[in-house]
Image (cartoon, coloured by chain):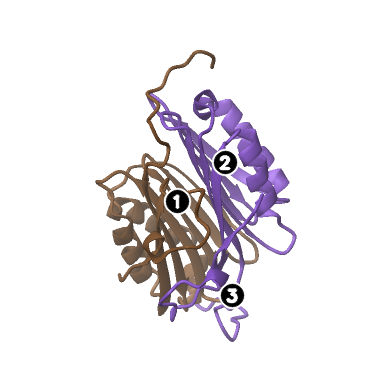
Chain colours: A brown, B purple
Amino acid sequence: MANQSYPVSETSLVPVGSHCILELYDCPTDLLNNLVFIRDSLQEAAKRAKSTLLKEITHQFHPYGVTALALLAESHISIHTWPETGYIAVDIFTCGQHTEPEAACKFLLQAFQARNHVLLNFPRGKLTPQLQKLEESFLVQASI
Amino acid sequence: MANQSYPVSETSLVPVGSHCILELYDCPTDLLNNLVFIRDSLQEAAKRAKSTLLKEITHQFHPYGVTALALLAESHISIHTWPETGYIAVDIFTCGQHTEPEAACKFLLQAFQARNHVLLNFPRGKLTPQLQKLEESFLVQASI
């Protein structure tokens, strides 16, 4: 890999995209152990985010719980389910001005029928090394 | 999937694990377009986190940039590189008391020779729907 040349920017602190951290609480437990439903939801979430799904992997845990990961042209989506508590941990990281990660979050909220949720949104590539205390501007609790 | 039974807990607001958001800035650009090095680093990061890597997917973007995702028994690791800016976006989400996601972050920081970084750590499954303003206790800027 020697002598490769890239157009290195003046600063590396360029925001590259939005990273949504989504907590889905109080979902119907049966949905959360249904690998086919979860994979279909992952694929639909990628569409709703206006992203391109390149590859995916899933895993059915025993006795229960599912993980589904999507590798996107614009970064990734993860879904991890805990049927025993009705909880799902989601993160959706998309780059590019054309993407709509919060639309994907809204879809998943509805698909999994979550009665409660929390959504945070980070501007990745913008968080600075000098950050000592988190400012509200770095994190947006979005309404979906 | 009807009539499945799960031991549903009294509350779904049970912390399930730590989600580290790691920004690596000012890395040597050649490392960031080396898919083999990045896949090896992903696998080593999973070990350093004391997690079990079940499946992985990678993608080489053109003209440059790599994504690597690891599906863990304990959740996931993602690595996305931008050789043109020397930036890497990492997230490491691990469940269980036995895991050490910050050790994996420290490894990646060193492996990619980042001159600057930011690490935030979320307790997933604990962020509450009532959260209106982020409190410092929810986010820890860790030293590694």
| Figure check: B64 above or below A29 | above
The C terminus of chain A appears in which quarter of the rendering? bottom left
Query: Residue B40's x, y, as percent?
Result: 64, 32
Give the side of residue A128 with respect to residue B75, left or right: left
Give the side of residue B139 with respect to residue B49, left or right: left
Q: How many marks?
A: 3
Q: Which mark is residue A84?
A: 3
The chain letter for the residue carrying disc 2 is B
> Looking at the image, which residue is at 46% across and 71% down?
B134
Q: Are the residues under badges 2 and 1 in a single subunit?
A: no
Distance between the alpha carbons at the discs numbered 2 and 1: 27 Å
Furthest residue in direction left, as rendered: A98
Q: Which mark is residue A127?
A: 1
For label 1, the crowd category at 10 Å Cα-Cα, with few meaning under 14, some 14 to 19 and many 20 or more, is many
Query: For the residues carrying marks 2 and 1, which lies nearer the camera in this image?
Result: 1
Instruction: Identify the secondary structure beneath mark 2.
Output: strand
Query: Residue B129's x, y, as percent?
Result: 44, 78
Distance between the alpha carbons at the discs numbered 3 and 2: 26 Å
The N terminus of chain A appears in which quarter of the rendering? top right
Instruction: Identify the secondary structure beneath mark 3.
Output: loop
Give the amino acid at mark 3: Glu
> Looking at the image, which residue is at 53% across and 65% down?
A81
Query: Residue B55's x, y, as percent?
Result: 60, 44
Q: Which mark is residue B56?
A: 2
Query: Residue B28's x, y, as percent?
Result: 54, 27
Give the amino acid at mark 2: Glu
